[in-house]
Image (cartoon, helix red, strand yellow):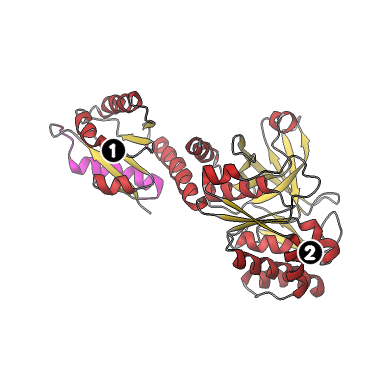
Amino acid sequence: MAINIYQVQSPLSQVTRNHTDAYLKTVGDALGEELKRVELDEFEKSPFGLVFVASGGSEGIFKAGYEHFSEKPCYILTSGESNSLAASMEILSFLQERGKRGEIIHGSVADVARRIRALEKAYRALGRLKGMRMGTIGAPSDWLIASDTDGRAYGEKIGLTLVPVPIEELISEANRGGYEPNEYTEKLMALGYDKEEMRKSFNVYGALKRIIKKYDLNAVTVRCFDLLDTVCSTGCLGLAILNAEGIYAGCEGDIPSAVSMAILGAVSGEPVFLCNPSRIDTAAGEMILAHCTLPVNMPKSMKLMTHYESNSGVAIAGEIQTGACTIFKADGELSRYFAKKAELVENLHETHLCRTQIKLKLDDFSYFLKHPINNHHTVCRGDHVDALEEFFNLIG
């Protein structure tokens, strides 16, 4: 995918087209994406683009086209040559005097590429989330006493709509039975777990798929513990498959956590693990998180077990690739969030925890122990903190 560039340059400049082509290609290569010059009208239609100030003396040219710019922030790319930085500073001051937001992107090629990547991820995430419909299948579980929300902020800030669905509808559909096999059901079935338990779990998955189609949903959160006595199974496998299919699916009717999954997934492009903080060792700088479901396409290996709390149904015990990861959570008003890079250092298999267990290395735990945002948190592979910060800058 190309990133649109609107270039301004003084006619008196000695900077040649070949020279600017070379710079844009170098940055594009570092990004892994083409930087494509476009005319002002096409640039204006782009949800995200860069104004490339190629030389000094280009301020007047920028001002001449200024009225065509929208209210979106203006990101000004400089090459660090031919007085482009000085001109960019004049342009940014001009914008700020008129109450507009902007930023100069300047530095080494690696730094420039890193900043552009974060901005692009944030804008791409907003595009992915706009128009999303999240089914809230049942109310939040009774123990989630601080995790409810009316959803108004989601509509106003990111264009996401909550769609209430009675839990009884899921129970009825699951008891009716039936599902369409696919690569994920076949992969799970091949693990050789009890066939009757697998059938009941896949019936929950099939029920969720029918509800998703009926209500035109892109995401769900499910009051899954209500399935234990009514369907005699759990939602763990159904949610795991939905997440692998790109349908964000959260547990326990927890709305802020499911929306956090959607945000982190949209920003990172990675599968997202919704999990409980289980234990912190501040002296060792380690934290254990666990849950009984995760996207089927996330672990490097997995086996099937019962759901931890109920010792029934089918749950995934997966091992996730070690390395850099991001832990994230947003509150129900999207007014506060936590995003931090961590290191996934070990997968655990303890008896008295939910089935997938990961140990993270962190340098500070004050957030978790003094001002946490509820219980569940989300984890994905890679460092996406800069992009998440920019995402929340964009939505205000």
Say above or below: 184 vs 111.
Answer: below
Residue linked to disc 2: 314
Q: How many marks?
A: 2
**Residue located 74% across and 45% down the image:** 276
User: What kind of secondary structure does the magenta stretch mostly adopt?
Assistant: helix
Q: Which dot marks residue 52?
A: 1
Q: Residue at x 23, y 37 (%)?
A: 65
Pick whichever, 298 or 368, lies toward us.
Answer: 368
Q: Are marks 2 and 1 in contact (CB under 8 Å)?
A: no
In this image, 242 relative to 126: left or right? right
Rendering quarter of residue 194: bottom right
The image shows residue 225 at horizontal and vertical percentages of 80, 56
Disc 1 residue type (three-letter): Phe
Q: Secondary structure at mark 2?
A: loop
**How many residues crowd mark 2 within 10 Å: few (<14), some (14–19), many (20+)?**
many
Residue 212's tag is none
Q: Which residue is more in the foreground, 329 or 157? A: 157
**Residue numbers of the magenta segment:** 13-33
Query: Mark 2 belongs to which amino acid?
Result: Val
